[in-house]
Amino acid sequence: MNANPSLSWDLARDVRELLAFPFMVNALEAGTIVAVLAASVGWYVVQRRQSFAAHTLSLMAFPGAAGAALAGLPAALGYYLACGTAALVMGAGRRQEIRGEAGESAATGTVQAAGLAAGFVFLALDHGVLGGLESLLFGTFLGVSRAQVLTLLIVAAAVLATLALVARPLLFSTLDPHSAQAHGVPVRALDVGFLLALGLAVAATTQITGVLLVFALLVAPAASAQTLTARPALGLALSIAIALLVVWLGLGLAYFSIYPVGFFTTSLAFGIYLLARLTRAGARRRSARTAVA
């Protein structure tokens, strides 16, 4: 391995260097899986205005990791158990008629506070400092194993297959929950199921982006896509494309620099979102001038 890798003008050489190392191949495979999963679920998150719920579930990685360390279990298992349990609690405790309003925010905030408190209790009982704290908070691409890639693939396949099966009623209940319920759509069951899918997606995404930067893949690509188009199919495809671009560039830049992958993924996602907003604003100004003329 090159002790001091650096970018060159030969893109093909740089790509060959990246793919020459198993840890980078694992990271790129895991990042690709996570990008597709996060962008797909994130598109619905933005549509349903559940970014606060996504943020709360991302924080559940802390008590999940602390509890797993206390029990002597893998941290990834702790992520999935904590995020999945929190999603089910949030779904069971919410009232469907106030989705997106203060009642849901209060219930979600309560779960967040309880989860953080449990994390500190687990740390105290463990009588130690949580290992890999920087990776937990900001993510890493080092040490991603084949077993982790396989686990991510299984989780992503299960979540994406479920979303595909319920895509039409889920979109209906997202855009107009009252009409959907009147037409016999099981809105509450879909709400709880989607929160569980969101919890699993957050647990998977956190392993790459870290707790604090999970929005880089879960919300920013979807927000950028929905800024550019209101068409569901096109918006979802664009969200996935942006997430893949962010992950691939972020991992490549992190390998050739001294900065963590979380810095690059977040910066790229934010930059693309700003570009999307500027593009939309420019289109509106051109339309306004055309209308006046």
Image (cartoon, rainbow, N blue to C red):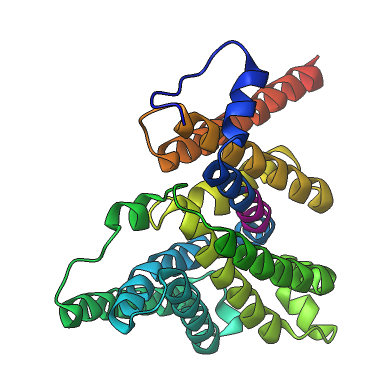
Q: Residue 157: x percent and y percent? A: 73, 67
Residue at the location (57% across, 36% down)?
A: 273
Assign the magenta stretch its main secondary structure: helix
In this image, 240 relative to 263: left or right? Answer: right
Count of picture labels: 0
Q: Residue 235: x percent and y percent? A: 76, 47
Residue 26 lies in the magenta-colored region: no
Whether residue 50 appears in this view of the structure is no
Pick the quarter of the image with the C terminus: top right
When asked about the image quadrant of residue 280, the answer is top right
Residue at the location (53% across, 89% down)?
A: 92
In this image, 129 relative to 6: left or right? Answer: left
The magenta segment: 32-39
Q: Residue furthest top?
A: 9
Whether residue 141 appears in this view of the structure is yes
Residue at the location (47% across, 75% down)?
A: 77
Q: Residue 27: x percent and y percent? A: 55, 47
Residue at the location (83% across, 87% down)?
A: 184
Q: Residue 284: x percent and y percent? A: 70, 27
Examine the rendered structure and indicate whether residue 21 appears above or below residue 106: above
Q: Nearer the viewer, residue 15 or 66?
A: 15
Q: Nearer the viewer, residue 117 or 95?
A: 117
Examine the rendered structure and indicate whether residue 88 appears above or below residue 46: below
